[in-house]
Image (cartoon, helix red, strand yellow):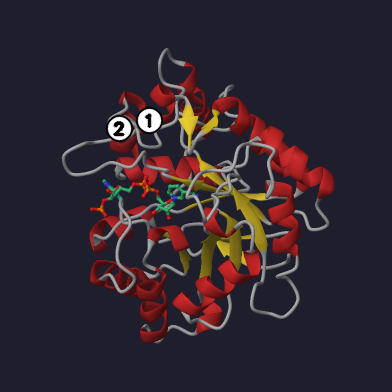
């Protein structure tokens, strides 16, 4: 079981393996399945939780943290600004913190660069106020009173991150993006290393379910390495991400055995690490798995919450 951490540019330590708390759909605030999942995760040794206002379940996550008996200072909690709150970040943050009720938030991420107008429910077009730079400037105001320890972004591409960095007073501590061997995010990885921004991989297993295994988990090389090292395919994928350096991972599992397996990070031999680093170059493999095979599949719809792939800076994958 890994208990390793990485240092953020704030000096804080982020555990390399965290628990994703998106229940594959939005759930009610006191969702019992979330509560049980977080209690189990803290029992098996997780010390990093990843949630969001958008997941609906911050209240259940926070109650599980409080009831766990694990000291607050030993748990790293990430949550995210709702797209509806870009125009009033302070109000959004207060709602996150009230729902979680855990004294402070370790890492507060802008969930998406897109704002949604709370009056119309429509996504604000790219470049229109509140832009993500305006939202970031409001997020910077959250640092100082101890209730928000670090701020960062999520779903930021090289282009959008460069736009933000040109105006930022505070360099984001983290950029959380989809990443796995089919989407290694090489350009973003390089930029974030140069700027001292830690990266967290979401959907690191490609979001498999009991009736729909992800193409990643059944990939021929992943299967071969899983047999060679006698580890689960999930552990192979997570170990590869962590071994890149500068990356943490937040796999979601509500099953204690799979939670434990996902903490079983190990070192791949260099040749195996390199082979997995190249797997995306095989025909058809380089792709977003975010909502894959659903109508909102990025690869089919070419849209992400109403923004084009160009607006997102996602038109060129690497
Ligand atoms: N920032 C963002 O925009 C964003 C977007 C998406 C996700 N996220 C974060 O990233 C987290 C993880 O992403 P995700 O939930 O999309 O995908 P994921 O972690 O790649 O996959 C989760 C799925 O994998 C199953 N699973 C977990 N471990 C397994 C294993 N060892 N073997 C087989 N199946 C396994 C889980 O089922 P069981 O529960 O039954 O084990 C669940 O169905 C989310 O929970 C969320 O916190 C962030």
Query: Viewer-proximal residue, 65 or 91?
Result: 91
Question: Residue 108's x, y, as percent?
Answer: 60, 63
Residue 173 seen: yes
The residue under label 2 is 294
Query: Viewer-proximal residue, 214 or 59?
Result: 59
- Relative to 8, is 279 above or below? above
Mark 2: few/some/many CA within 10 Å (<14, 14-19, 20+)? few
Query: Viewer-proximal residue, 131 or 210?
Result: 131
- Relative to 50, is 202 above or below? above
- What residue is rendered at 45% in x and 76% in y? 99
Query: Does residue 194 appear to the left or right of 103 in the view shown?
Result: right
Q: Work out which residue is located at the far left of the displayed protein and give it.
A: 211
Q: Work out which residue is located at the far front of the displayed protein and give it.
A: 119
Question: Residue 259's x, y, as percent?
Answer: 31, 59
The image quadrant where one finds the C terminus is top right
For the residues labelled 2 and 1, say whether their Cβ atoms are less than 8 Å apart: yes
Question: Residue 63's x, y, as percent?
Answer: 37, 80
Which image quarter: residue 159? top right
Specify the label residue 250 is tagged with. none
Query: Does residue 68 appear to the left or right of 5 in the view shown?
Result: left
- What residue is rendered at 35% in x and 74% in y? 60
The image quadrant where one finds the N terminus is bottom left
Which image quarter: residue 124? top right
Element at badge 1? loop
Specify the label residue 297 is tagged with. 1
Element at badge 2? loop
């Amino acid at each position: 079981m890994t208990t390793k951490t990485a240092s953020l540019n704030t000096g804080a330590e982020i555990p390399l393996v965290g628990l994703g708390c998106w229940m594959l759909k939005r759930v009610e605030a006191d969702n019992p399945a979330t509560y049980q999942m977080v209690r189990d995760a803290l029992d098996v040794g997780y010390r990093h939780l990843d949630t969001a206002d958008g997941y609906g379940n911050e209240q259940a996550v926070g109650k599980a943290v409080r009831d766990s008996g694990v000291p607050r200072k030993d748990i790293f909690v990430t949550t995210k600004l709702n797209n509806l709150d870009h125009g009033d970040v302070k109000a959004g943050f207060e709602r996150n913190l009230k729902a979680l009720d855990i004294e402070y938030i370790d890492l507060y991420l802008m969930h998406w660069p897109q704002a949604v107008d709370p009056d119309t429910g429509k996504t604000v077009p790219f470049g229109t106020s509140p832009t993500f730079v305006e939202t970031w400037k409001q997020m910077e105001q959250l640092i100082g009173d101890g209730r928000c320890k670090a701020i960062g972004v999520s779903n930021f591409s090289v282009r959008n991150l460069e736009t933000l960095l040109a105006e930022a007073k505070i360099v984001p501590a983290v950029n959380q993006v989809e990443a796995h061997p089919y989407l290694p995010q090489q350009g973003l990885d390089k930029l974030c290393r140069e700027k001292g921004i830690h990266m967290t991989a979401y959907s690191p297993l490609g979001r498999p379910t009991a009736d729909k295994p992800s193409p990643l988990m059944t990939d021929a090389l992943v299967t071969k390495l899983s047999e060679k090292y006698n580890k689960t395919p999930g552990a192979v994928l997570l170990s590869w991400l962590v071994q890149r350096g500068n990356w943490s991972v937040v796999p979601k599992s509500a099953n204690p055995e799979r939670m434990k397996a996902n903490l079983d990070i190990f070192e791949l031999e260099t040749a195996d690490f390199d082979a997995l680093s190249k797997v995306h170059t095989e025909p058809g493999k380089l792709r977003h798995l975010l909502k894959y095979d659903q109508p909102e599949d990025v690869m089919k719809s070419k849209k992400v919450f109403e923004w084009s792939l160009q607006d997102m800076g996602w038109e060129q994958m690497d």
